[in-house]
Image (tube, rainbow, N blue to C red):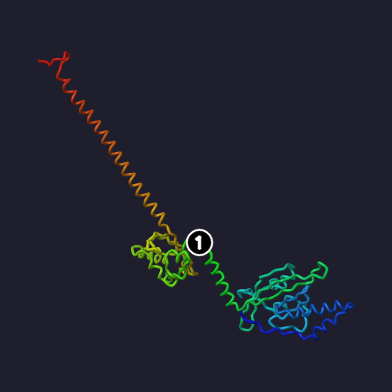
Amino acid sequence: MTTRPPLERPPLERLDSSVSSRTSQNPLSDKFAQLRDAAFYASDLPGFLLSADETLCYPHVYAGVVPEEPVELADVDAYFLEVWALWDEDFTRKLRTIEYPAVHLSRHRKAFQGMRCGVVRGDRRVVLECRGQPLYAAGSTEFIGGICYVAELGDVEEVWRKKREEQFRSFETICDSLPHIVWSSDEMGKIDYFSRAWYEFTGLTEQESMGHGWRSVMHTDDEAESWQSLVLAKRAPGQVDSHYRCRRHDGQYRWVHARASPRLDEDGNVARWYGTITDIHDVITMKEEARKLERENERLLSMEQTARESSRMKSQFLANMSHELRTPIAGQYGADGFQAI
């Protein structure tokens, strides 16, 4: 973050003249007013005062400059747009007057914090963060104006970098809490991120895993097919699902389900890959055991069917034999039981 230049302190004579210009019959009130003004001027935190009717503003030590006198405004829009040109925090557009923190506070009359905007200072683009506080007349609910405090976050490039780092840390925290392995790579599958689960599963270090190093734990019989599926998906972008064996830290090869989804650029080409790897070895093993049991059941059913058919054929054979044995004897005798001569 860029360090602000030392603040210029207003001369005490100016404070005295400001106080003496007030007509007051109460010395204690004058002393309090002097202390109040001194406390305001002594603050290291830049601020911006704006009256409720938006006719008076006072940019307090803004950018290290202390104005000699408060500014009387004939046209608040013209003043802010011309003198204090502000941008959105990404510097994509200039703000409208209603979006200025001080004007927002004056018109909405509600405290706020974390409002960001940008200002151009020479060749620098500086991001500011503001918080606002409405002001009321002493002992009254009459709104008399507001004060905005301004904190300089730094040049926009530095703010973007920190924001990306914070987002990535948040992304890492989420990914590390998942039971699945989460990864990301460039368009050709060159890995640049693995979640913590990968290192716990494989036992590899980050250095060993990055780039194409992760392929060292793939089973040699599965590597070519899995890699080919990613290459083909690059030509016709879409989700890729593959199964292969991956060597665990104890040396056992386990079946995993890998899923990859592409992020496309403006031309529809793959810019990056994001994906997960899930250990499905136990599921595969259970399915294989189930298939073995199914095949065994089919064999037993077939044997039972064969046995039943054999038994039926045996019974039929015996019945036929019994019939054949009886029929010839009956045909050789007459009604009286004697063979005809």
Residue 186: tell me if it is visible: no
Q: Position of residue 316 (x, y in %)?
A: 24, 31
Q: Residue 157: name its quadrant.
A: bottom right
Q: Position of residue 75 (x, y in %)?
A: 76, 76
Q: Return the residue nearer the eye: 219 or 89.
A: 219
Classify residue 69 by image quadrant: bottom right
Question: In the shown orientation, is residue 61 left or right of residue 29?
Answer: left
Identify the residue shown where x is 22% and y is 28%: 320
Q: Residue at x 35, y 46 (%)?
A: 294
- In the rendering, at what x and y percent does residue 134 appear? 75, 70
Residue located 86% across and 77% down the image? 28
Q: How many marks?
A: 1
Extreme residue in the top direction: 336
User: Horizontal placement of 38 versus 219: left or right?
Assistant: right
Circle 1: residue type: Leu
Q: Please report the residue visible at 51 percent of the width from the left and 64 percent of the height from the top.
A: 176
